[in-house]
Image (tube, rainbow, N blue to C red):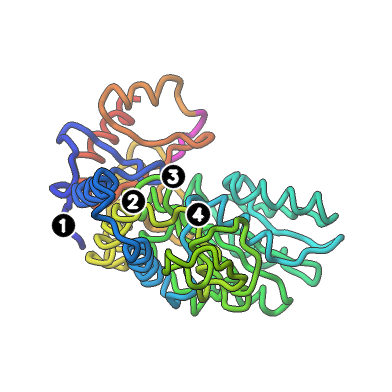
């Protein structure tokens, strides 16, 4: 168990923020790193040509460690939708083939596939799960000879319902379909092993569980796509771009590995320094320890909620760091306003409450949550 890390965040004692799945707070280390990066732009004569490449490679190294993937397979992106657009641009899709998604999947991992289906004559297959079940069986049952792409998360963004990605990856390989993962709601809070899962593409926006600034993200690209098509033609991604004196010796070849897919202006020190600092903290604590800690916290919250009549997905069906609480009927009117008035911050998703703590939370935070729910 990781002891409370609240001292590393600027979070008043009377603020009970249990909403990391919405957006994480920035730690003091990250804020200091962001300020250091901004100071370089304040004095650009201190930022040399070589500096354009140092921070991106540090970011890439941290990203690879968190995904347990080769460094050369990692690209720097600004958002989940950007990375998913790269995946969509490089995966073959034909008329009559199928793209599998989860019911009520996050929009970024649906809209791009709807567009591709419209362009090619493919169709979207939306899988449903049985109540209180994980998603794995439903996804595996949907995969067949017509499946071209399986585009799923590790856990559902609304309630944390789990997908066994190792099993799904094996099923994809058995029928020759591609696997595209949105790990935004899991990477950094749950261990992930690219070698075991073998996705074609995997993305994660960094502003949630990776404790990093908004506008940062990472993309894993399997080596078979390293000669693929990027969605922008950034000069810095071309081979030889380190030599600023020869940029107009135009090159058709790229930096090695997945670097061709990096976003333009990837070298922004303000964002990269902050993201590196956020990932440094996660690597310091260790993702398995984070997962275990948050799992035990959520077990305690779930037990307290059950005592006052609320229900949650069974432990075996949900991600450890995610808790979705449901009332016997509708969510009471005005509940979110009551919680906010008590400085308790969670999210409502449909007819359930999404509770997502992190290591900056303490017992007083979930006791405040249960106190308000108890009044209801």
> What residue span does the magenta drawing correspond to?
324-330
Q: Give neighbour class at mark 2: few <14, some 14-19, many 20+ (Cα, 10 Å).
A: many
Q: Would you name the residue on which mark 2 appears?
A: 212
* 307, 300: nearer the viewer: 300
Q: Position of residue 345 (x, y in %)?
A: 32, 33
| Mark 4 or 2, closer to the camera | 4
Total labels drawn: 4
Question: The N terminus lies in which quarter of the figure?
Answer: bottom left
The residue nearer to you, when weighing 353 against 217, is: 217
Upstream in sequence: badge 4 or badge 1: 1
- Residue behind mark 4: 264
Q: Earlier in the sequence, mark 1 or mark 3?
A: 1
- Ranked by sequence position, the earlier of labels 1 and 2 is 1
Q: Which residue is mark 1?
A: 3
Mark found first going from the N terminus, 2 or 3: 2
How far, Cα to Cα, is label 1 from label 3? 24 Å
Q: Nearer the viewer, mark 2 or mark 3?
A: 2
* Disc 3 packing (10 Å; few <14; some 14–19; many ≥20): many
């Amino acid at each position: 168990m990781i002891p409370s890390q609240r001292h590393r965040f600027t979070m008043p004692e009377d603020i009970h923020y249990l909403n990391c799945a919405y957006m994480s707070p920035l730690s003091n280390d990250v804020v200091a790193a962001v300020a250091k990066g901004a100071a370089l732009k304040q004095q650009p004569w201190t930022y040399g040509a070589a500096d354009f490449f140092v921070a991106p490679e540090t970011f890439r190294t941290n990203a690879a460690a968190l995904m347990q993937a080769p460094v050369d397979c990692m690209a720097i992106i600004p958002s989940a939708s950007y990375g998913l657009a790269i995946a969509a641009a490089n995966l073959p899709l034909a008329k009559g083939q199928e793209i599998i998604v989860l019911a009520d999947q996050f929009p970024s991992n649906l809209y791009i596939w709807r567009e591709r289906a419209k362009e090619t004559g493919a169709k979207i297959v939306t899988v449903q799960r049985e109540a209180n079940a994980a998603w794995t069986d439903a996804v595996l049952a949907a995969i067949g000879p017509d499946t071209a792409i399986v585009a799923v998360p590790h856990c559902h963004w609304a309630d944390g319902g789990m997908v066994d990605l190792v099993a799904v990856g094996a099923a994809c390989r058995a029928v020759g379909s591609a696997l595209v993962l949105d790990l935004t709601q899991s990477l950094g809070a749950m261990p992930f092993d690219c070698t075991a899962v073998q996705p074609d593409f995997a993305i994660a926006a960094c502003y949630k569980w990776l404790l990093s600034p908004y506008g940062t993200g990472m993309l894993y690209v399997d080596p078979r796509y390293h000669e693929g098509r990027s969605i922008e033609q950034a000069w810095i991604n071309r081979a030889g771009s380190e030599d600023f004196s020869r940029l107009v010796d135009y090159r058709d070849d790229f930096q090695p590995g997945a670097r061709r897919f990096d976003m333009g202006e990837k070298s922004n020190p303000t964002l990269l320094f902050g993201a590196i600092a956020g990932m440094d903290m996660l690597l310091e604590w260790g993702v398995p320890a984070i997962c275990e800690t948050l799992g035990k916290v959520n077990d305690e919250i779930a037990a307290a909620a059950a005592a006052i009549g609320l229900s949650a997905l069974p432990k075996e069906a949900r991600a450890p760091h995610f808790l979705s609480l449901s009332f016997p009927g509708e969510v009471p009117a005005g509940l979110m306003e009551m919680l906010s008035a008590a400085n308790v911050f969670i999210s409502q998703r449909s007819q359930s409450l999404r509770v997502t703590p992190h290591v900056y939370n303490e017992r007083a935070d979930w006791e405040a949550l249960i106190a308000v729910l108890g009044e209801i």
